[in-house]
Amino acid sequence: MKLNEPVSQQGAGQRAAAPAGKYRWTICALLFFATTVNYLDRQVLSLLAPQLSKEFNWSNSDYANITAAFQFVYALSMVFAGPIVDRLGTKKAYMWAIAIWSGGAILHAYSVPMGNAVGTAMGALGMVAAPASIVGFIISRAVLAVGEAGNFPAAIKATAEFFPKKERAFATGIFNSGANVGAILAPLTVPLIAIHWGWQAAFIAIGAIGFIWMIFWHLMFDSPEKKLSAAELAYVRSDSGTGATAAAPVGAKKVPWTKLLTYRQTWAFAGGKFLTDGIWWFFLFWLPKYLASEYQMGPADIVVPLAVLYSMTMFGSIGGGYFPAYFMNRGYSPYDGRMKAMFVIALFPLVVLAAQPLGSISFWVPVILIGIGASAHQAWSANLFTTVSDMFPQRTVASVVGIGGMAGGLGGVAVSKLGGWLFDYYGAQGSLSTGYMIMFTLCAVAYLLAWFLMKTLVPQHKEITDL
Protein backbone atom coordinates (compact mmCIF):
# COMPACT_ATOMS: atom_id res chain seq x y z
CA MET A 1 0.00 0.00 0.00
CA LYS A 2 2.84 2.41 0.79
CA LEU A 3 4.28 1.92 -2.68
CA ASN A 4 1.11 3.38 -4.17
CA GLU A 5 0.89 6.39 -1.89
CA PRO A 6 3.52 8.59 -3.64
CA VAL A 7 1.84 7.98 -6.99
CA SER A 8 -1.54 8.91 -5.58
CA GLN A 9 -0.18 12.00 -3.89
CA GLN A 10 1.63 13.00 -7.04
CA GLY A 11 -1.54 12.68 -9.07
CA ALA A 12 -3.47 14.76 -6.58
CA GLY A 13 -0.74 17.38 -6.64
CA GLN A 14 -0.86 17.53 -10.42
CA ARG A 15 -4.62 17.97 -10.38
CA ALA A 16 -4.35 20.76 -7.81
CA ALA A 17 -1.65 22.49 -9.81
CA ALA A 18 -3.35 22.20 -13.20
CA PRO A 19 -3.36 25.58 -15.00
CA ALA A 20 -6.75 27.30 -14.75
CA GLY A 21 -6.56 30.17 -17.22
CA LYS A 22 -4.08 31.42 -19.79
CA TYR A 23 -3.91 35.19 -19.36
CA ARG A 24 -0.36 34.92 -18.05
CA TRP A 25 0.68 33.91 -21.57
CA THR A 26 -0.82 37.13 -22.90
CA ILE A 27 1.57 38.94 -20.58
CA CYS A 28 4.39 36.76 -21.89
CA ALA A 29 3.43 37.78 -25.43
CA LEU A 30 3.61 41.46 -24.49
CA LEU A 31 7.07 40.91 -23.01
CA PHE A 32 8.10 39.04 -26.17
CA PHE A 33 7.10 41.92 -28.44
CA ALA A 34 8.78 44.48 -26.18
CA THR A 35 12.03 42.52 -26.30
CA THR A 36 11.69 42.22 -30.08
CA VAL A 37 11.41 46.00 -30.36
CA ASN A 38 14.31 46.37 -27.92
CA TYR A 39 16.66 44.39 -30.13
CA LEU A 40 15.37 45.90 -33.36
CA ASP A 41 16.32 49.33 -32.06
CA ARG A 42 19.63 48.08 -30.69
CA GLN A 43 20.75 46.40 -33.92
CA VAL A 44 20.09 49.14 -36.48
CA LEU A 45 23.51 50.71 -35.93
CA SER A 46 25.43 47.45 -36.32
CA LEU A 47 23.71 46.70 -39.64
CA LEU A 48 24.52 50.17 -40.93
CA ALA A 49 28.05 50.15 -39.45
CA PRO A 50 29.89 49.17 -42.67
CA GLN A 51 28.08 51.96 -44.58
CA LEU A 52 28.46 54.55 -41.81
CA SER A 53 32.12 53.65 -41.26
CA LYS A 54 32.85 54.45 -44.90
CA GLU A 55 30.71 57.59 -44.96
CA PHE A 56 32.23 59.06 -41.79
CA ASN A 57 35.67 57.41 -42.00
CA TRP A 58 35.37 55.54 -38.69
CA SER A 59 38.14 53.18 -37.60
CA ASN A 60 37.32 49.96 -35.75
CA SER A 61 38.27 51.76 -32.53
CA ASP A 62 35.88 54.62 -33.37
CA TYR A 63 33.05 52.16 -33.85
CA ALA A 64 34.10 50.33 -30.67
CA ASN A 65 33.90 53.64 -28.76
CA ILE A 66 30.35 54.23 -30.00
CA THR A 67 29.21 50.73 -29.06
CA ALA A 68 31.10 50.88 -25.76
CA ALA A 69 29.33 54.15 -24.92
CA PHE A 70 26.01 52.32 -25.22
CA GLN A 71 27.23 49.48 -23.04
CA PHE A 72 28.77 51.76 -20.42
CA VAL A 73 25.66 53.92 -20.04
CA TYR A 74 23.54 50.76 -20.11
CA ALA A 75 25.63 49.37 -17.26
CA LEU A 76 25.32 52.51 -15.15
CA SER A 77 21.60 52.78 -15.87
CA MET A 78 21.08 49.20 -14.73
CA VAL A 79 22.10 50.23 -11.21
CA PHE A 80 19.09 52.54 -11.11
CA ALA A 81 16.72 50.69 -13.46
CA GLY A 82 16.07 47.80 -11.10
CA PRO A 83 15.21 49.90 -8.03
CA ILE A 84 13.12 52.25 -10.20
CA VAL A 85 11.13 49.30 -11.56
CA ASP A 86 10.64 47.97 -8.03
CA ARG A 87 9.56 51.43 -6.85
CA LEU A 88 7.31 52.52 -9.73
CA GLY A 89 5.85 49.11 -10.40
CA THR A 90 6.11 47.03 -13.54
CA LYS A 91 3.45 48.77 -15.64
CA LYS A 92 4.54 52.38 -15.20
CA ALA A 93 8.27 51.63 -15.31
CA TYR A 94 7.98 49.69 -18.56
CA MET A 95 6.05 52.56 -20.16
CA TRP A 96 8.80 55.03 -19.26
CA ALA A 97 11.55 52.67 -20.40
CA ILE A 98 10.20 52.03 -23.88
CA ALA A 99 9.27 55.69 -24.41
CA ILE A 100 12.85 56.74 -23.64
CA TRP A 101 14.54 54.06 -25.74
CA SER A 102 12.21 54.58 -28.71
CA GLY A 103 12.95 58.30 -28.58
CA GLY A 104 16.66 57.51 -28.39
CA ALA A 105 16.40 55.20 -31.39
CA ILE A 106 14.82 57.97 -33.48
CA LEU A 107 17.43 60.44 -32.22
CA HIS A 108 20.12 58.51 -34.15
CA ALA A 109 18.77 60.00 -37.38
CA TYR A 110 19.82 63.44 -36.15
CA SER A 111 23.23 62.42 -34.76
CA VAL A 112 25.29 64.47 -37.21
CA PRO A 113 23.59 67.86 -36.68
CA MET A 114 23.46 67.12 -32.96
CA GLY A 115 27.20 66.35 -32.99
CA ASN A 116 27.88 69.58 -34.90
CA ALA A 117 25.96 71.55 -32.29
CA VAL A 118 27.86 69.95 -29.43
CA GLY A 119 31.17 70.51 -31.23
CA THR A 120 30.36 74.19 -31.77
CA ALA A 121 29.43 74.62 -28.11
CA MET A 122 32.60 72.89 -26.93
CA GLY A 123 34.68 74.94 -29.35
CA ALA A 124 33.22 78.15 -27.92
CA LEU A 125 34.39 76.99 -24.50
CA GLY A 126 37.88 76.30 -25.81
CA MET A 127 37.42 72.52 -25.64
CA VAL A 128 38.32 70.08 -28.40
CA ALA A 129 35.53 67.74 -29.47
CA ALA A 130 35.69 64.45 -31.33
CA PRO A 131 34.33 64.33 -34.92
CA ALA A 132 30.69 65.37 -35.05
CA SER A 133 29.42 61.99 -36.26
CA ILE A 134 31.08 60.17 -33.36
CA VAL A 135 29.85 62.65 -30.74
CA GLY A 136 26.31 62.59 -32.12
CA PHE A 137 26.06 58.82 -32.26
CA ILE A 138 27.51 58.47 -28.76
CA ILE A 139 24.80 60.79 -27.41
CA SER A 140 22.08 58.90 -29.28
CA ARG A 141 23.38 55.55 -28.04
CA ALA A 142 23.47 56.89 -24.48
CA VAL A 143 19.77 57.87 -24.59
CA LEU A 144 18.91 54.49 -26.12
CA ALA A 145 20.86 52.74 -23.35
CA VAL A 146 19.07 54.60 -20.54
CA GLY A 147 15.70 53.39 -21.80
CA GLU A 148 16.75 49.88 -22.77
CA ALA A 149 18.21 49.30 -19.32
CA GLY A 150 14.64 49.03 -18.04
CA ASN A 151 13.58 46.21 -20.35
CA PHE A 152 14.91 43.12 -18.61
CA PRO A 153 14.41 44.22 -14.98
CA ALA A 154 10.76 44.98 -15.81
CA ALA A 155 10.27 41.82 -17.88
CA ILE A 156 11.82 39.52 -15.26
CA LYS A 157 9.74 41.18 -12.55
CA ALA A 158 6.58 40.71 -14.63
CA THR A 159 7.49 37.05 -15.09
CA ALA A 160 7.98 36.60 -11.35
CA GLU A 161 4.56 38.20 -10.77
CA PHE A 162 2.59 36.24 -13.38
CA PHE A 163 4.24 32.79 -13.44
CA PRO A 164 4.95 30.03 -10.91
CA LYS A 165 8.63 29.20 -10.45
CA LYS A 166 8.39 26.00 -12.48
CA GLU A 167 7.26 27.98 -15.57
CA ARG A 168 9.48 31.04 -15.23
CA ALA A 169 12.47 29.76 -17.20
CA PHE A 170 10.18 28.66 -20.03
CA ALA A 171 8.33 32.00 -20.02
CA THR A 172 11.66 33.84 -19.85
CA GLY A 173 12.93 31.77 -22.77
CA ILE A 174 9.87 32.70 -24.80
CA PHE A 175 10.03 36.45 -24.21
CA ASN A 176 13.81 36.41 -24.46
CA SER A 177 13.45 34.86 -27.92
CA GLY A 178 12.13 38.27 -28.90
CA ALA A 179 15.80 39.27 -28.99
CA ASN A 180 16.29 36.67 -31.70
CA VAL A 181 13.22 37.75 -33.65
CA GLY A 182 14.40 41.34 -33.47
CA ALA A 183 17.82 40.24 -34.66
CA ILE A 184 16.18 38.35 -37.55
CA LEU A 185 13.81 41.15 -38.58
CA ALA A 186 16.50 43.84 -38.42
CA PRO A 187 18.66 42.53 -41.32
CA LEU A 188 15.50 41.84 -43.32
CA THR A 189 14.27 45.43 -42.99
CA VAL A 190 17.01 47.88 -42.05
CA PRO A 191 19.24 47.50 -45.16
CA LEU A 192 16.23 47.78 -47.47
CA ILE A 193 14.95 50.91 -45.75
CA ALA A 194 18.43 52.44 -45.85
CA ILE A 195 18.90 51.61 -49.54
CA HIS A 196 15.56 53.12 -50.59
CA TRP A 197 15.11 56.01 -48.15
CA GLY A 198 18.48 56.58 -46.49
CA TRP A 199 20.03 55.47 -43.22
CA GLN A 200 18.22 58.18 -41.25
CA ALA A 201 14.85 56.71 -42.27
CA ALA A 202 15.89 53.31 -40.91
CA PHE A 203 16.41 54.73 -37.42
CA ILE A 204 13.14 56.68 -37.51
CA ALA A 205 10.96 53.85 -38.85
CA ILE A 206 12.28 51.20 -36.47
CA GLY A 207 12.27 53.55 -33.47
CA ALA A 208 8.62 54.47 -33.96
CA ILE A 209 7.45 50.88 -33.44
CA GLY A 210 7.94 51.12 -29.67
CA PHE A 211 5.27 53.80 -29.32
CA ILE A 212 2.72 51.42 -30.85
CA TRP A 213 3.58 48.73 -28.30
CA MET A 214 2.96 51.20 -25.49
CA ILE A 215 -0.75 51.34 -26.39
CA PHE A 216 -1.20 47.59 -25.94
CA TRP A 217 0.83 47.54 -22.73
CA HIS A 218 -1.29 50.31 -21.22
CA LEU A 219 -4.53 48.51 -22.06
CA MET A 220 -3.59 44.92 -21.27
CA PHE A 221 -1.21 44.95 -18.29
CA ASP A 222 -2.05 45.37 -14.62
CA SER A 223 -1.38 43.54 -11.37
CA PRO A 224 -2.06 39.77 -11.31
CA GLU A 225 -4.89 40.31 -8.84
CA LYS A 226 -6.69 42.50 -11.39
CA LYS A 227 -5.96 40.48 -14.53
CA LEU A 228 -6.01 36.81 -13.49
CA SER A 229 -8.96 34.68 -12.46
CA ALA A 230 -8.92 33.39 -8.90
CA ALA A 231 -8.03 29.91 -10.13
CA GLU A 232 -5.14 31.10 -12.32
CA LEU A 233 -3.85 33.37 -9.56
CA ALA A 234 -3.85 30.40 -7.16
CA TYR A 235 -1.90 28.36 -9.73
CA VAL A 236 0.66 31.16 -10.16
CA ARG A 237 1.17 31.31 -6.39
CA SER A 238 1.10 27.52 -5.96
CA ASP A 239 4.86 27.06 -5.56
CA SER A 240 5.67 30.41 -3.95
CA GLY A 241 3.94 29.99 -0.62
CA THR A 242 5.39 32.12 2.12
CA GLY A 243 9.05 31.55 1.35
CA ALA A 244 11.65 33.85 -0.02
CA THR A 245 10.15 34.15 -3.43
CA ALA A 246 6.59 34.79 -2.32
CA ALA A 247 4.87 37.98 -3.34
CA ALA A 248 5.70 40.97 -1.20
CA PRO A 249 2.97 42.41 1.02
CA VAL A 250 1.59 45.79 0.07
CA GLY A 251 3.74 48.56 1.51
CA ALA A 252 6.72 46.28 2.11
CA LYS A 253 9.95 48.16 2.71
CA LYS A 254 12.21 48.44 -0.32
CA VAL A 255 15.62 46.80 -0.09
CA PRO A 256 18.60 48.99 -1.08
CA TRP A 257 20.91 47.47 -3.66
CA THR A 258 23.85 48.00 -1.29
CA LYS A 259 22.20 45.41 0.97
CA LEU A 260 21.77 43.03 -1.96
CA LEU A 261 25.51 43.20 -2.65
CA THR A 262 26.16 41.44 0.66
CA TYR A 263 24.79 38.16 -0.74
CA ARG A 264 26.90 35.65 -2.66
CA GLN A 265 23.84 34.90 -4.81
CA THR A 266 23.94 38.47 -6.15
CA TRP A 267 27.61 38.15 -7.02
CA ALA A 268 27.05 34.80 -8.71
CA PHE A 269 24.42 36.31 -10.99
CA ALA A 270 26.49 39.44 -11.63
CA GLY A 271 29.61 37.37 -12.36
CA GLY A 272 27.71 35.22 -14.83
CA LYS A 273 26.43 38.33 -16.59
CA PHE A 274 29.84 40.04 -16.66
CA LEU A 275 31.53 37.10 -18.33
CA THR A 276 28.83 36.31 -20.91
CA ASP A 277 26.76 39.38 -21.83
CA GLY A 278 29.60 40.91 -23.78
CA ILE A 279 29.79 37.79 -25.97
CA TRP A 280 26.22 38.24 -27.17
CA TRP A 281 26.80 41.93 -27.79
CA PHE A 282 29.97 41.13 -29.71
CA PHE A 283 27.96 38.87 -31.99
CA LEU A 284 25.22 41.48 -32.31
CA PHE A 285 27.41 44.53 -32.94
CA TRP A 286 30.34 43.05 -34.86
CA LEU A 287 29.01 40.27 -37.11
CA PRO A 288 27.99 42.63 -39.95
CA LYS A 289 31.48 44.14 -39.93
CA TYR A 290 33.03 40.66 -39.73
CA LEU A 291 31.17 39.48 -42.84
CA ALA A 292 31.97 42.74 -44.63
CA SER A 293 35.70 42.66 -43.83
CA GLU A 294 36.40 38.92 -44.07
CA TYR A 295 34.10 38.06 -46.99
CA GLN A 296 33.58 41.45 -48.67
CA MET A 297 29.82 41.21 -48.24
CA GLY A 298 27.65 44.28 -48.80
CA PRO A 299 24.42 45.30 -46.99
CA ALA A 300 22.23 43.16 -49.24
CA ASP A 301 24.59 40.17 -49.02
CA ILE A 302 24.47 39.85 -45.23
CA VAL A 303 20.66 39.70 -45.01
CA VAL A 304 20.25 35.94 -45.47
CA PRO A 305 23.28 34.79 -43.41
CA LEU A 306 22.29 36.95 -40.43
CA ALA A 307 18.65 35.91 -40.71
CA VAL A 308 19.68 32.25 -40.67
CA LEU A 309 22.06 32.77 -37.76
CA TYR A 310 19.55 34.54 -35.57
CA SER A 311 16.79 32.09 -36.51
CA MET A 312 18.97 29.43 -34.95
CA THR A 313 19.08 31.36 -31.69
CA MET A 314 15.31 31.04 -31.25
CA PHE A 315 15.70 27.32 -30.64
CA GLY A 316 18.27 27.99 -27.94
CA SER A 317 16.16 30.59 -26.20
CA ILE A 318 12.95 28.54 -26.01
CA GLY A 319 14.57 25.11 -25.71
CA GLY A 320 17.04 26.34 -23.13
CA GLY A 321 14.23 27.70 -21.00
CA TYR A 322 12.49 24.31 -21.05
CA PHE A 323 15.64 22.19 -20.56
CA PRO A 324 15.92 22.55 -16.74
CA ALA A 325 12.49 20.92 -16.39
CA TYR A 326 14.20 17.65 -17.33
CA PHE A 327 16.18 17.79 -14.08
CA MET A 328 13.42 19.36 -11.97
CA ASN A 329 11.07 16.53 -12.89
CA ARG A 330 13.67 14.19 -11.42
CA GLY A 331 13.59 15.87 -8.03
CA TYR A 332 16.15 18.65 -8.34
CA SER A 333 15.37 22.08 -6.92
CA PRO A 334 14.79 24.83 -9.50
CA TYR A 335 18.27 26.30 -8.96
CA ASP A 336 20.12 22.97 -9.00
CA GLY A 337 18.22 21.83 -12.09
CA ARG A 338 19.05 25.10 -13.82
CA MET A 339 22.74 24.86 -12.95
CA LYS A 340 22.97 21.34 -14.36
CA ALA A 341 21.26 22.49 -17.54
CA MET A 342 23.53 25.53 -17.76
CA PHE A 343 26.66 23.36 -17.58
CA VAL A 344 25.51 21.37 -20.61
CA ILE A 345 24.61 24.61 -22.40
CA ALA A 346 28.05 26.08 -21.64
CA LEU A 347 29.70 23.31 -23.66
CA PHE A 348 28.06 24.27 -26.96
CA PRO A 349 29.91 27.59 -27.53
CA LEU A 350 33.17 25.64 -27.78
CA VAL A 351 32.32 25.00 -31.45
CA VAL A 352 33.04 28.70 -32.11
CA LEU A 353 36.74 27.79 -31.77
CA ALA A 354 36.49 26.25 -35.25
CA ALA A 355 34.81 29.26 -36.89
CA GLN A 356 37.97 30.99 -38.07
CA PRO A 357 40.13 27.94 -38.92
CA LEU A 358 37.33 26.47 -41.07
CA GLY A 359 36.11 29.79 -42.43
CA SER A 360 38.09 29.34 -45.66
CA ILE A 361 35.67 26.61 -46.73
CA SER A 362 32.71 28.99 -46.95
CA PHE A 363 31.27 31.93 -45.04
CA TRP A 364 28.46 29.56 -44.07
CA VAL A 365 30.82 27.62 -41.79
CA PRO A 366 31.43 30.50 -39.33
CA VAL A 367 27.80 31.61 -39.69
CA ILE A 368 26.52 28.19 -38.58
CA LEU A 369 29.12 27.71 -35.84
CA ILE A 370 28.60 31.20 -34.46
CA GLY A 371 24.86 30.54 -34.71
CA ILE A 372 25.30 27.54 -32.42
CA GLY A 373 27.27 29.67 -29.97
CA ALA A 374 24.71 32.48 -30.09
CA SER A 375 21.90 29.96 -29.64
CA ALA A 376 23.66 28.59 -26.58
CA HIS A 377 23.95 32.13 -25.22
CA GLN A 378 20.19 32.60 -25.41
CA ALA A 379 19.61 29.27 -23.66
CA TRP A 380 22.14 30.30 -21.02
CA SER A 381 20.59 33.75 -20.61
CA ALA A 382 17.04 32.42 -20.12
CA ASN A 383 18.26 30.31 -17.20
CA LEU A 384 20.69 32.84 -15.79
CA PHE A 385 17.90 35.42 -15.41
CA THR A 386 15.65 32.91 -13.70
CA THR A 387 18.19 32.02 -11.00
CA VAL A 388 17.33 35.42 -9.51
CA SER A 389 13.61 34.73 -9.12
CA ASP A 390 14.47 31.27 -7.74
CA MET A 391 16.33 32.70 -4.77
CA PHE A 392 15.26 36.33 -4.13
CA PRO A 393 11.96 37.83 -2.93
CA GLN A 394 9.80 39.26 -5.73
CA ARG A 395 10.21 42.82 -4.49
CA THR A 396 14.00 42.59 -5.03
CA VAL A 397 14.06 40.72 -8.35
CA ALA A 398 14.29 43.80 -10.58
CA SER A 399 17.00 45.30 -8.38
CA VAL A 400 19.16 42.17 -8.53
CA VAL A 401 18.62 41.91 -12.28
CA GLY A 402 19.69 45.55 -12.51
CA ILE A 403 22.93 44.84 -10.63
CA GLY A 404 23.63 41.92 -12.94
CA GLY A 405 22.78 44.04 -15.96
CA MET A 406 25.31 46.63 -14.82
CA ALA A 407 27.95 43.91 -14.58
CA GLY A 408 26.98 42.59 -18.00
CA GLY A 409 27.19 46.07 -19.49
CA LEU A 410 30.68 46.58 -18.09
CA GLY A 411 31.66 43.22 -19.52
CA GLY A 412 30.28 44.38 -22.86
CA VAL A 413 32.40 47.55 -22.70
CA ALA A 414 35.51 45.45 -22.11
CA VAL A 415 34.71 43.11 -25.00
CA SER A 416 33.94 45.97 -27.43
CA LYS A 417 37.07 47.91 -26.56
CA LEU A 418 39.21 44.79 -26.78
CA GLY A 419 37.69 43.87 -30.13
CA GLY A 420 38.18 47.35 -31.59
CA TRP A 421 41.82 47.45 -30.49
CA LEU A 422 42.57 43.93 -31.77
CA PHE A 423 40.97 44.55 -35.16
CA ASP A 424 42.82 47.83 -35.69
CA TYR A 425 46.12 46.35 -34.47
CA TYR A 426 46.04 43.17 -36.54
CA GLY A 427 44.31 44.89 -39.45
CA ALA A 428 47.26 47.31 -39.71
CA GLN A 429 49.54 44.27 -39.92
CA GLY A 430 47.45 42.67 -42.64
CA SER A 431 46.31 39.88 -40.32
CA LEU A 432 42.77 40.84 -39.33
CA SER A 433 41.84 37.15 -39.12
CA THR A 434 44.13 36.79 -36.10
CA GLY A 435 42.12 39.41 -34.23
CA TYR A 436 38.90 37.54 -34.94
CA MET A 437 40.48 34.24 -33.88
CA ILE A 438 41.37 35.73 -30.49
CA MET A 439 37.87 37.13 -30.02
CA PHE A 440 36.19 33.87 -31.07
CA THR A 441 38.33 31.99 -28.54
CA LEU A 442 37.10 34.31 -25.81
CA CYS A 443 33.51 33.76 -26.98
CA ALA A 444 33.96 29.98 -26.83
CA VAL A 445 35.27 29.60 -23.27
CA ALA A 446 33.42 32.41 -21.47
CA TYR A 447 30.39 30.32 -20.50
CA LEU A 448 32.35 27.54 -18.81
CA LEU A 449 34.32 30.15 -16.86
CA ALA A 450 31.04 31.80 -15.81
CA TRP A 451 29.51 28.48 -14.75
CA PHE A 452 32.46 27.55 -12.53
CA LEU A 453 32.42 31.01 -10.95
CA MET A 454 28.70 30.77 -10.18
CA LYS A 455 28.99 27.24 -8.82
CA THR A 456 31.88 28.29 -6.59
CA LEU A 457 29.92 31.22 -5.14
CA VAL A 458 26.63 29.31 -4.71
CA PRO A 459 27.37 25.56 -4.52
CA GLN A 460 23.82 24.64 -3.47
CA HIS A 461 20.37 26.15 -3.85
CA LYS A 462 19.68 28.63 -1.07
CA GLU A 463 16.77 31.06 -0.99
CA ILE A 464 17.14 34.48 0.61
CA THR A 465 14.78 34.58 3.58
CA ASP A 466 16.04 37.53 5.64
CA LEU A 467 15.03 40.47 3.41
Image (cartoon, rainbow, N blue to C red):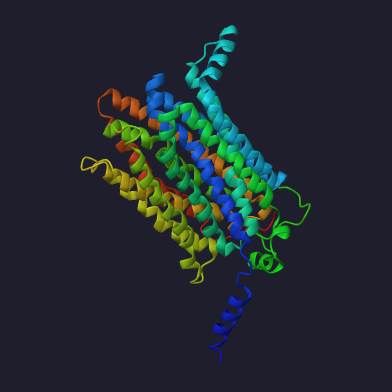
Nearest the viewer among 263 and 186 is 186
Q: Is residue 411 above or below residue 112?
A: below
Figure quadrant of residue 56: top left
Q: Residue 179, image x and y in percent?
A: 48, 46
Q: Is residue 408 above or below residue 380?
A: above
**Looking at the rendering, in which quadrant would you find the N terminus?**
bottom right
Residue at the far left in the pictured view: 361
Q: Residue at x 28, y 30 (%)?
A: 432
Q: How many marks?
A: 0
Q: Of 213 and 371, which appears nearest the observer?
A: 213
**Which of the 4 image quarters holds residue 96?**
top right
Q: Position of residue 362 (x, y in %)?
A: 23, 42
Please state if 104 lies on the left or on the right of 426 as rendered. right
Q: Residue at x 30, y 45 (%)?
A: 353
Residue 363 falls left or right of residue 188: left
**Residue at the location (51% across, 45% down)?**
36
Asked if residue 70 lies left or right of residue 49, the reply is right
| Residue at the (24%, 41%) spot, across then down | 359
Residue 384 can be seen, yes or no = yes
Residue at the far right: name it: 251
In this view of the protein, which residue sits in the foreground, 436 or 170? 170
- Image vertical order of residue 351 relative to residue 331, above or below: above
Report x, y in % for residue 415. Answer: 43, 35
Residue 445 visible in the displayed image: no
Kindly give the residue lying farthest to the bottom in the view shown: 1
